[in-house]
Image (cartoon, helix red, strand yellow):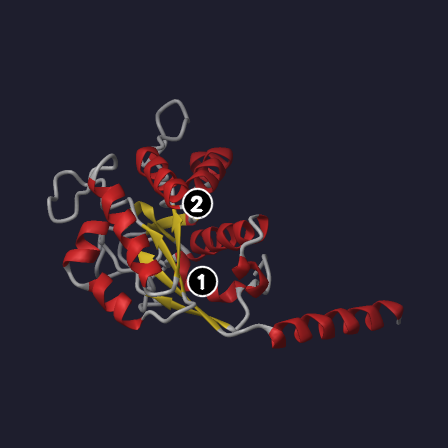
Amino acid sequence: MKFLVSLFFCLAFTQAQADELKPLTLHLVGDSTMSDKPNLAYPERGWGQLLPQFLLPQLSVVNHAANGRSTRRFLNEGRWQLLLSELGRGDYVLIQFGHNDSKQSDPARYAAFDSDYQTFLTQFIADVRERGATPMLASSVCRRNFAEDGSLKRDLADYASAAAQVAKAAEVSFFDLQQHSCDLWQQLGKANSQPYFIQVPAGLYQKFPAGKVDNTHLTLQGASKIAQFFVQELKKQQHPLANYVYRELL
């Protein structure tokens, strides 16, 4: 009985805290590892798609992330300008790129980690601040790319480091999701990390009749884990948005 009474007062206090929160909007900007996936019959998910499950409804999440985008392409396609047109004073913007910026064979997307990538991120930060909103940076999700000796190839480390440098120079919050995800994949190993990424059998999906193994894009389990890392970092950093975290476990 004492437990139930204690639980009741705890829930009532939490609800009272939530009711006092000011409604805010968090905009997500990034690539396919973050974006919404409307085809729920296919197992791929972006971690931004799962993020609202960890948050109170007073924090609205607007996901602008899109498959195949880099900093350069997001800007050149007009997607960045569209976000700015929707941005309100007091909003937050989380920016996460790197996967497609690293594709040197594709000039429409490539942005070198030690030059254009940092330039674009710096521009994004300035644009957000100019509109009275708060920018935030995150490093890209680690690929599941293991070497023969069982070690994890951290092939996006240069982009993660570049994002951290820009965040430090601009004095914005930085969320090192690459470090968290790389460490977890390494800890789990090649076999046990597989459920976090796409692996579909042959003869099930029309788009992939021969089946598919994908070590970049996330399953529901993988997307949920990255979203969890983000909300845990909010709380660890005592970020203002940590007040809107409803839970750390689904």
Q: Does residue 28 appear left or right of residue 7 in this picture? A: left
Residue located at (62% from left, 77% from top): 19
Q: Residue at left 21%, top 57%? A: 74
At x 23% / y 68%, what residue is drawn?
82
Q: In this view, does 174 lie to the left or right of 158?
A: right
Q: Where is residue 68 in the image (x, y as percent from the top left)?
A: 22, 53
Seen in the image, is 33 located left or right of residue 102?
right
Between circles 2 and 1, the one closer to the viewer is 2
Return the residue at label 1. Answer: 50
Depth check: give the residue in front, 211 or 183: 183
Q: Is residue 32 visible?
A: no
Q: Is residue 238 visible?
A: yes
Give the SS element for disc 1.
helix
The residue type indicated by label 1 comes to: Leu
Which quarter of the figure is the C terminus placed in? Answer: bottom right
Q: Where residue 212 appears, x then y in whole percent?
A: 27, 49
Residue 131, by quadrant, is bottom left
Instruction: Identify the residue at the far top of this view.
Output: 149
Taking the view exactly as shown, the residue that stands out farthest to the right is 2
Q: How far apart are marks 2 and 1 (CA)?
A: 15 Å
Q: Quadrant of the N terminus?
A: bottom right
The amino acid type, in three-letter code, at marker 2 is: Leu
